[in-house]
Image (spheres, grey):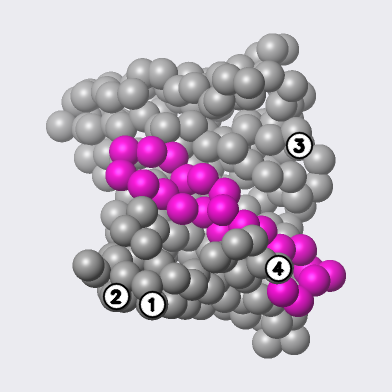
Amino acid sequence: KAGVTQTPRYLIKTRGQQVTLSCSPISGHRSVSWYQQTPGQGLQFLFEYFSETQRNKGNFPGRFSGRQFSNSRSEMNVSTLELGDSALYLCASSLGTANNEQFFGPGTRLTVL
Amino acid sequence: GENVEQHPSTLSVQEGDSAVIKCTYSDSASNYFPWYKQELGKGPQLIIDIRSNVGEKKDQRIAVTLNKTAKHFSLHITETQPEDSAVYFCAANRDDKIIFGKGTRLHILP
């Protein structure tokens, strides 16, 4: 069974630009969660999508948005990039029922210059 | 909302010794507590988890204990080996919203 894949693995953008990250979950998984990982703040929950609907949301500004497609693949978009958005963005997939194990992808390393 | 505190932030132990990482949580409704290991350049990987109706769980050299009354849980690694060197995260889950601790960097000294 293939694991969670994320593309691209590395990305360099400049302030003010926007970026779209992609996550393909494990086959059969309907839930995709996104996290931001930084040295200072650790792993912070962005949002979770289940069956194409946002089911949970963290405390991030509206510049961070996402969506999920009918095949459960998910994209995350960040608009008007700021230097502080530089981070490792991780997605995790799960079956989506209560307290299921989340399987993480390798992450996308975003650098904002 | 839920808040998870994790200690220590860095831990160095001699190979063969035991390592203990402790976490506390604030939301008494949290009912699932996974532990993740993250190696350099990789995403976190689940190593063990415990649900709120259980006080202890063991898997070979790894064990987790949960004290619901005190709202704290701990990871115990015995007979540590070089490949145990990594960053470990505890987490508390309520309604599929997982809140992570800040992580513990574990160094296994030769």
- Which residue is at a point 53% across and 37% down the rendered structure image? A104
Q: Give the residue type at disc 2.
A: Gln
Q: Is residue B53 magenta?
A: yes
Of A32 and A64, the residue lying toward us: A32
Could you tell me which secondary element the residue under label 4 belongs to?
strand
- Residue occupied by mark 1: B17
- Which residue is at a point 48% across and 60% down the rendered structure image? B89
- Residue occupied by mark 3: A96
Give how far apart the Cα atoms at labels 3 and 1 are. Answer: 38 Å
Chain to which the residue tagged by mark 4 belongs: B
* For discs 3 and 4, the disc positioned in front in the rendered view: 4
Same subunit, labels 1 and 4: the answer reads yes
Residue B29, image x, y percentages? 77, 68
Mark number, residue A88: none
Chain to which the residue tagged by mark 1 belongs: B
Mark number, residue B14: 2
Residue B25, image x, y percentages? 61, 74
- Which residue is at a point 40% across and 32% down the rendered structure image? A107
Give how far apart the Cα atoms at labels 1 and 2 are. Answer: 6 Å
Residue segment shown in magenta: B33-56
Could you tell me which secondary element the residue under label 1 belongs to?
loop
Q: Give the residue type at disc 1.
A: Asp
Along the polypeptide, which appears first: circle 4 or circle 2? 2
Q: Is residue A48 magenta?
A: no
